[in-house]
Image: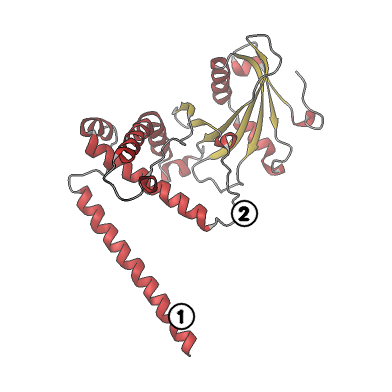
Amino acid sequence: MHLSEGAVDLFVNITANMLDSEVKQNVVVAKNADTMLKQESVDALSPQVLEAYRKIAARNAIIDFELTVQPIGGKGENSYGSVLKVCLTPTQTSSGQSSATPLHTILKMAPTSQARRIHMRVKDVYAREVFMYAEVFSEFEALSVLLNNNNNNNNNNKVDASAYQMHFNVTPQMLHSSLADDTEFIIFEDLTTAGYTINSRVNLPTYDLVVCAFRAIAQLHAMSFVLQARQPQRFAALVTQMDDNLFTADMEVVSIEFGKKSVRRTRQMFESDLRLAMWIRHK
């Protein structure tokens, strides 16, 4: 296997002893990656992570491959671990091809500092995230399709149904996960290949981006109530898997009152700003 010119010095040959296999893979750090993060990114690809990528490759009929690693964000920016863009480039497939379409992924790995792990309940957070991707999001997507169809078929609704379309079909696919103690990691598909972009942390988010983010968060929470109302047995089976779920008997009443209080507080803040602006204008 060969590396592109200029990247040879970044080449890391993962030996058979590390992978318990005679097959070798190359790990290359992206040339435009932060210099301070290059060696850290290579070291972060533990034998467990590499074995996971070998399984992903096998599912796609890939015999041998190269991994290109590029950090997302700098040190301290990802409080729940490291986030890397990892591209799996086939160098040999089961059909004998020397090259095939690369697989673009996002690798999220838990921090190893014990103090940090205990303080932030890292293991619980990763377990919940895997649970959401493995069990819950597929339920939300199915409900979203059903609700959209009902809205489109409701001829008596005078309001444009398209304004209430709920799209829960852009959740990245979880390709692999591991919840082993102190080495938790999750591998997702990279949605940038589908036309989505990652907002750089050095750029302030635009108004449209903020609205989009809040709409997605609101829809995520709303779908929990939809699932509870439409499929109570399935909902009950899911929440029993969480030790401290928040869906108590009076959850709806509490949420409504909390929402009203938040709206009142927001209105008071806007009115206060408006009075201040008018006072300054007439001063």
- Is 206 left or right of 40, judged from the image as shown? left
Whether residue 178 is visible: yes
Q: Earlier in the sequence, mark 2 or mark 1?
A: 2
Q: CA distance from mark 2 to mark 1?
A: 31 Å
247 with respect to 218 (left or right)? left
Residue named by callout 1: 277
Where is residue 118? Give x, y as percent. Answer: 42, 42
Q: Residue at x 34, y 45 (%)?
A: 221
Q: Are marks 2 and 1 in contact (CB under 8 Å)?
A: no
For image coordinates 32% across by 41% down, the residue present is 151
In this picture the colour scheme is secondary structure
81 or 99, nearer to the observer: 99
Q: Looking at the picture, tell me which residue is in the foreground, 43 or 104.
A: 104
> What residue is at 55 percent from the left and 39 percent from the top?
82
Q: Quadrant of residue 135?
A: top left
In the displayed orientation, state which residue is furthest to the bottom: 283
Q: Amino acid at mark 1?
A: Ala
Q: Quarter holding the N terminus? A: top right
* Residue 142, image quadrant: top left
Q: Is residue 96 above or below residue 12?
A: above
> Where residue 121 appears, x then y in whole percent?
40, 41
Q: Is 249 located above or below residue 175 in the figure?
A: below
Residue 201 lies, in percent from the top left, at 59, 51
Residue 265 is left or right of residue 100, and the answer is left
Q: Residue furthest right?
A: 5
Specify the quadrant of the image occupied by residue 24: top right
Q: Which residue is mark 2?
A: 202
Residue 243 relative to residue 9: left or right: left
User: Could you tell me residue 265's position as x and y percent?
Assistant: 33, 67
Q: Return the mark for residue 262.
A: none
